[in-house]
């Protein structure tokens, strides 16, 4: 059968015109049995639309791994290095990940206790909660009323030593039904977003760039981002902003000399904008929680200096300054009308372009609401490419 596509259902909270190029449902083919020609189509569709949904598919962990790997055939290990590279227990990711024994690149994530699952006799899963990560929290009374938060906007990536995975696949095995929840941004804007229980929220990195004013586009196209060594260990003692879009600057990060051993050569310095290998578009791809410094190039020769920010370039090392600038650039794109909150059904498979979108876990489950998902992404065989010389000329 031929590959057919249909738009994703746009929630009433979204601006349909802004989300028209984001996401497609794929029909007519099984993601576990793609011919090379069909895979090529799926590959290009993913990079074009940022996320693909297959509904009602039976998919083994082996098939999920094979599909994920097909996007980057020489990649091997899980995106976070099969848990070996982050000082393990100290990492804030530690409690969220359980490995499928047969296919260690596929992780079991979710909530509640799962029995006899793909070789795991018993797995206790815990949906990440903003209450243990954000500086402030929704009160228990308001949680009871269904208020919640974005947990953490991010890219799936170790951001140390390993290259950010190209694609993440998420497969819903057990999806509990329950009351919809209301995300509160709690940042003084009054923004709120109604979402399905346990949604995964996505925003498009292209939009994040496209909606910036010219002076910030110019900064974005000239900037490289340096991440902290072992960022998830580094950030573990710190607390996040109420929007889940970065860390509050209060000096709580783990000092570099107390981190697990690290090497300068393994630190990640990545462009702020990542170039889409199929469309050539620029995606604003920064994991705000892990950032430590920004390197901003000077304006290229011939660029207009009037109104330009950092015309002579800059190296920003003050964490608060770094984070404030990033927040100013990223916050507009997580506005309620730009978010696609996926409404999970059992046997949904979602593939997303991990180098082109940001996503967040959302919401809170009760302990007896069992949710089981299979997640796979693979540390990439290369680092993402930044803007070309022409891009810099065009936007700087
Ligand atoms: Fe993720």
Image (cartoon, rainbow, N blue to C red):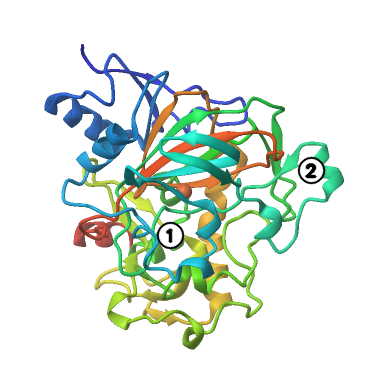
Q: Which residue is mark 1?
A: 286
Identify the image quadrant of residue 12.
top right
Element carrying mark 2: helix
- Name the N-terminal-most of marks 1 and 2: 2
Q: Which residue extends farthest bottom?
A: 257
Q: Which residue extends farthest left?
A: 36
Identify the image quadrant of residue 127.
top right
Q: How would you rate the neighbour count of disc 2 (Cα within 10 Å): few for under 14, some for 14-19, many for 20 or more?
A: some
Please report the residue visible at 60 percent of the width from the left and 66 percent of the height from the top. 247
Give coordinates of residue 394: x percent, y percent. Answer: 28, 57
Image side of residue 249 versus residue 184, left or right: left
Image side of residue 169 versus residue 33, left or right: right
Q: Nearer the viewer, mark 1 or mark 2?
A: 2
Please report the residue visible at 87 percent of the width from the left and 44 percent of the height from the top. 141
Q: How would you rate the neighbour count of disc 1 (Cα within 10 Å): few for under 14, some for 14-19, many for 20 or more?
A: many
Give coordinates of residue 22: x percent, y percent. Answer: 41, 33
Q: Is residue 21 visible?
A: yes
56, above or below 213, in the image? above
136, above or below 64, in the image? below
Q: Which residue extends farthest right?
A: 141
Disc 1 residue lies near ligand 1 with CB under 8 A: no
Please report the residue visible at 69 percent of the width from the left and 35 percent of the height from the top. 368
Residue contact between numbered discs 1 and 2, judged by CB atoms under 8 Å: no
Q: Nearer the viewer, residue 136 or 364?
A: 364
Check the picture and name the quadrant holding the N terminus: top left
Q: Which residue is mark 2?
A: 143
């Amino acid at each position: 059968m031929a590959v057919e596509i249909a738009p994703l259902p746009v929630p009433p909270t979204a601006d349909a015109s802004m989300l028209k190029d984001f996401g497609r449902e794929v029909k007519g083919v099984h993601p576990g049995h793609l011919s090379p020609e069909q895979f090529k189509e799926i590959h290009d569709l993913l990079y074009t639309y940022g996320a693909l949904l297959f509904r009602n598919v039976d998919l083994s962990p082996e098939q999920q791994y094979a599909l994920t790997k097909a996007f980057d055939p020489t990649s091997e290990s899980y995106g976070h290095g099969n848990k070996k590279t982050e000082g393990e227990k100290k990492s804030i990711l530690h409690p969220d990940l359980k490995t499928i024994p047969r296919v260690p690149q596929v992780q079991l994530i979710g909530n509640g206790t799962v029995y006899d699952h793909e070789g795991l006799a018993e797995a206790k899963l815990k949906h990440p909660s903003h209450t243990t990560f954000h500086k402030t929290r929704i009160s228990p009374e308001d949680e009871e009323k269904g208020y919640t938060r974005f947990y953490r906007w991010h890219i799936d990536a170790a951001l140390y030593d390993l290259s950010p995975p190209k694609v993440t696949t998420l497969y819903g095995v057990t999806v509990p039904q329950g009351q919809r929840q209301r995300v509160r941004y709690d940042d003084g804007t009054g923004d709120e977003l109604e979402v399905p229980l346990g949604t995964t929220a996505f925003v498009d990195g292209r939009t994040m760039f496209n909606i910036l004013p010219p002076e910030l586009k110019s900064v974005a196209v000239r900037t490289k981002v340096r991440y902290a060594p072992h960022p998830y260990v580094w950030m573990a003692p710190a607390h996040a902003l109420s929007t889940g879009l970065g860390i509050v600057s209060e000096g709580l990060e783990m000092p570099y000399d107390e981190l697990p051993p690290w090497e300068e050569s393994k630190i990640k310095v990545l462009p702020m904008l990542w170039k889409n290998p199929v469309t050539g578009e620029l995606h604003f791809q920064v994991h705000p929680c892990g950032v430590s410094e920004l390197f901003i190039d000077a304006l290229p020769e011939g660029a207009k200096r009037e109104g330009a920010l950092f015309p002579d370039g800059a190296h920003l090392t003050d964490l608060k300054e770094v984070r404030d600038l990033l927040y100013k650039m990223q916050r507009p794109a997580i506005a309620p009308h730009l978010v696609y909150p996926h409404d999970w059904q059992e046997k949904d498979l979602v593939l997303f372009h991990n180098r082109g979108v940001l996503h967040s876990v959302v919401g809170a489950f009760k302990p007896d609401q069992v949710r089981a998902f299979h997640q796979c992404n693979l540390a990439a065989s290369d680092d993402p490419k930044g803007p070309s010389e022409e891009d810099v000329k065009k936007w700087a």
